Image (cartoon, rainbow, N blue to C red):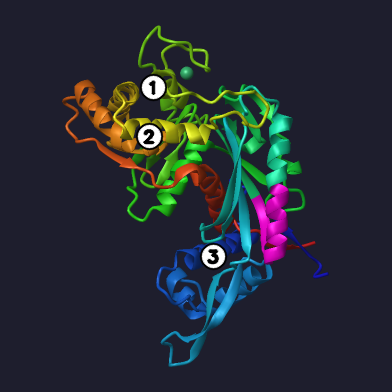
């Protein structure tokens, strides 16, 4: 035993000016400098000192602590240009990872992400979670977690913690699902600590669209710094990213474009309002209008009926490729309402780049032209052209983005060794 204990301090809990806080801040400076190092060769301690403005002695001490914590490893020797002496390269420990997870209306999924934010693997388990009991869903998630814990053990990986994305409004600090209308969950505490016991970080909770937007920003090299992310699932999620940072609003609910009213007095929405965008352009609304057989849902049970949700999108896709008028009209109609909501949002936020994820990305070829026409009709004099981008990340975006958020928090707030 080292006589030390690792202590993780929640963001915002630091008291400025304390010696431990200065060291914590310096640990974060070194760690993020290693994480952001972009050249092929990993940085040496001397290069990190130059980069951070810290003394070489300080950097050496900080690196030693980060190695002891298992966050950083030495990666061979190379010449760092300082008097020709070889330096030891440093990198994030590739054996440390975070388990990203998502519960959505028609599936649960999980996958590992390393400290560089790179996905290692993932699995999606189709399951009808509408109006299901939370403990049943977390039970299904538990099966995936067991698989990934076994995988990690066999591969010599260490899972530091987890991140769970939910299609709804969440209170991350209190691990509370405030309102997830398509799951039928209100004020639900999920018992996250029990999902990944005995891990350094535990499990954190995220909104699905916010997590997907983070994944897009971090994983796609040409991603814009400012954009509106619109995620099409059974529900429609939204997120606002401004200057590369999520804008979540004081209650974490900013960007909820799915519940913008596009047809006052229209169809009832799961949120309790009428005529929300979700009722006109959500996945099931498109299926119904297209005449494609929608999946039969048995709340709380695995989706075993034919077709499964992921097959349904393939059926719709095939109908669109074949030029079936009803399918084309259904997607056109969804694009019309999406365009109305996007045009209003672009004006409200002065954000003119929209990234489409989920089924909107899968239907991009057909829905984007309708969206553009509608946005032009609803915002003809906005002054800036609307730019529509399709996210290439697919169904794993939320679990990857949630895990990347946990990794980022870890790098910016590394644990500190404190004397007992
Ligand atoms: Zn609604």
The residue under the point 43% across, 52% down is 218
Viewer-nearest of discs 1 and 2: 2
Question: In front: 140, or 266?
Answer: 140
Quick check: can you spot residue 406? no
Tell me which label, 2 or 3, sits earlier in the chain.
Answer: 3
Compared across the picture, whether 360 is left or right of 207 comes to left
Q: Compared to 372, does 62 lie above or below?
A: below
Where on the picture, by quarter, is residue 349?
top left
Is 272 above or below relative to 139?
A: above
Question: Counting residues from the N terminus, which is met first, the one under dot 1 or under dot 2?
Answer: 1
Q: How many marks?
A: 3
**Ligand 1 is within 8 Å of the C-beta of the residue at disc 3:** no
Helix, strand or loop status at disc 2: helix
- Quadrant the C terminus occupies: bottom right
Q: Position of residue 148 (x, y in %)?
A: 68, 53
Please give the label number shown on residue 31. 3
x and y percent of residue 169 in the render? 55, 29
- Residue holding disc 2: 318
Q: Which residue is mark 1?
A: 290
Q: Residue furthest top?
A: 265
Q: Nearer the viewer, residue 341 or 347?
A: 341
In the image, which residues are magenta? 145-161
Upstream in sequence: badge 3 or badge 1: 3
Q: Mark 1 vs ligand 1: CB under 8 Å?
A: no
């Amino acid at each position: 035993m080292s006589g030390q204990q690792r202590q993780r301090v929640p963001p915002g809990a630091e008291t400025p000016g304390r010696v431990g806080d200065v060291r914590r801040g310096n640990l974060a400076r070194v760690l993020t400098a290693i994480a952001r190092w972009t050249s092929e060769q990993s940085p040496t301690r001397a290069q990190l000192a130059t980069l951070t403005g810290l003394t070489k002695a300080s950097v050496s001490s900080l690196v030693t602590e980060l190695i002891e914590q298992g966050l950083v490893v030495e990666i061979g020797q190379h010449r760092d240009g300082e008097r020709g002496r070889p330096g030891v390269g440093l990198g994030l420990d590739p054996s440390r990872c975070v388990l990203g997870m998502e519960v959505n209306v028609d599936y649960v999924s999980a996958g590992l992400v390393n400290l560089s934010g790179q996905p290692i693997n993932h699995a999606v388990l189709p399951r009808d979670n509408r109006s299901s009991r939370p403990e049943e869903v977390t039970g299904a998630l538990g099966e995936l977690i067991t698989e990934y814990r076994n995988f990690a053990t066999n591969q010599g990986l260490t899972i530091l913690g987890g991140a769970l994305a939910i299609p709804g409004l969440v209170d991350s600090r209190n691990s509370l699902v405030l309102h997830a209308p398509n799951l039928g969950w209100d004020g639900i505490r999920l018992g996250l600590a029990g999902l990944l016991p005995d891990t350094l970080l535990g499990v954190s909770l995220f909104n699905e669209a916010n997590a997907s937007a983070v994944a897009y920003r971090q994983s796609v090299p040409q991603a814009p710094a400012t954009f509106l992310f619109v995620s099409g699932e059974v529900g429609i999620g939204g997120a606002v990213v401004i200057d590369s940072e999520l804008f979540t609003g004081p209650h974490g609910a900013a960007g909820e474009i799915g519940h913008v009213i596009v047809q006052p007095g229209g169809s009832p929405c799961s949120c309790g309002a009428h005529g929300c965008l979700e009722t006109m352009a959500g996945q099931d609304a498109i299926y119904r209008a297209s005449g494609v057989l929608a999946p039969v849902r048995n709340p709380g049970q695995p989706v075993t009926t034919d077709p499964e949700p992921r097959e349904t999108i393939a059926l719709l896709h095939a109908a669109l490729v074949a030029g079936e008028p009803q399918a084309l009209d259904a997607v056109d109609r969804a694009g019309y309402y999406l365009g109305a909501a996007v045009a209003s949002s672009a004006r409200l936020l002065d954000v003119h780049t929209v990234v489409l994820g989920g089924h909107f990305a899968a239907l991009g070829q057909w829905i984007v032209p309708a969206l553009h026409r509608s946005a032009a009709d609803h915002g003809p004099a906005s002054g800036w052209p609307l730019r529509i981008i399709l996210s290439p990340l697919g169904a794993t975006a939320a679990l990857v983005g949630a895990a990347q958020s946990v990794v980022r928090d870890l790098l910016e707030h590394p644990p500190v060794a404190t004397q007992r």
